Amino acid sequence: MVVTPLQGLQAGAAPGAVRYASGERLAEATALAASCEAALLVLGLDWRLEGEHIHPGDIAPILRQIPPPHPLLRRWWPPVARAIAAITSYGSARQGGDFAAGDRTNLELPAEQVALIEAVLAANPRTVVVLMGGGAILIEAWRRAVPAILLLWYPGERGGEALADVVFGQVSPSGRLPFAIPTSADHLPDFEPRAPQVRYDLWHGYRRLQRDGNPAAFPFGFGLSYAELRLSQVEAELQPDQIRLAVTAQNAGLLASEFVVQVYAEPPGLLLERPQRSLVGFARVALGPGDCRRLQLLIPLRQLAYFDEASSHFWLEAGCHRLRVGQHSEDGGVLLEINCEATDLGP
């Protein structure tokens, strides 16, 4: 049974404490928000904005290969299949139709959702925005005006209960972004959803943002919590084929939570252009209020290496490799330096 966000919130609160407006009429939504202690908006993407997509024009070559519906039609079927393919090649996808959605060409929320956020915020500044969707959503136009933003993803059939647990403080949020959310789509590589060929190079995601000097709105690995993580006593030892890193993690908050300790490498980059900072290790740890735990992370030297096309081997570059232990890709964290000799790590 699917538990919607509304059902989850109503079940998790006192009877009558959660009041609802669909948001289709701004006047109704703003009047309700103004009369409440706090407002919560559930917005984002659905199948009409992102989902499986096949453009009719792209399947024309496949239609030419359609087998005849009956063996007796095999002789005269090919021209029929070619005619079907020719007609389909002129097709176009209608937004909201059977072939709609797919790769988004606009990463922002629809204009009517942004208008709803602005109107409800004006009526009640204590507004939480909950975003549903399967990928990055650009929210630069309004994110600084909102006191709280929760990315719910596509949460599954019990998602409403999970939302209520987080909103009402029963569970501390512990998710971390698997990508960086930029401040502008201009900071991303060019995108053509119907391109016959796409070239992926090293410069995408948080590595591209760092190279171009564009801080992310929300960095790779970012995520807030109701608790506070403190890192201390960070040590690293260079071993023949790995780095052994130890760190003490402490929950300095009043609520049990899970944290993700992340290790990023900054290579010398003297022999060739390389990313300024790359994730090389991480560990998730669950800590009760005030708890401490000593963590050990083993980082293979291959994680710090580059690939040499001439020899088809991975090489560890000589020089100072800096390790940053923190909570996301732009976190200064705790800095360690490891001096390495040039090493052939094999194919």
Image: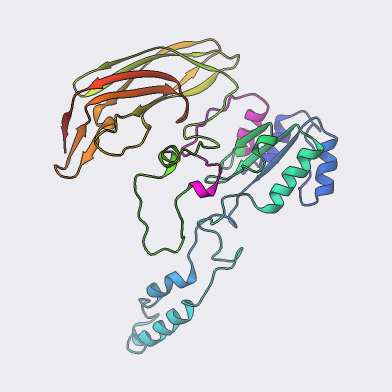
Question: Which residue does the image show at 44% across and 51% down from the upper left?
Answer: 189
| Number of numbered markers | 0
Is 327 on the left or on the right of 171, as rendered? left
Our reading of the magenta stretch's main secondary structure is loop
**51 drawn magenta:** no
Residue 19 lies, with reference to residue 227, above or below; the image says below
Q: Residue furthest bottom?
A: 76
Q: Position of residue 61 (x, y in %)?
A: 38, 74
Residue 143 lies, with reference to residue 110, above or below; the image says above
Question: Which residue does the image show at 55% across and 68% down from the upper left?
Answer: 93
Q: Position of residue 138 (x, y in %)?
A: 58, 45
Question: Which residue does the image show at 47% across and 30% down from the upper left?
Answer: 330
Q: Position of residue 154 (x, y in %)?
A: 56, 44
Q: On the rendered image, what quadrant is the N terminus found in? A: top right
Highlighted magenta segment, given as a residue range: 160-187
Q: Position of residue 26 (x, y in %)?
A: 80, 49
Is 129 on the left or on the right of 57, as rendered? right
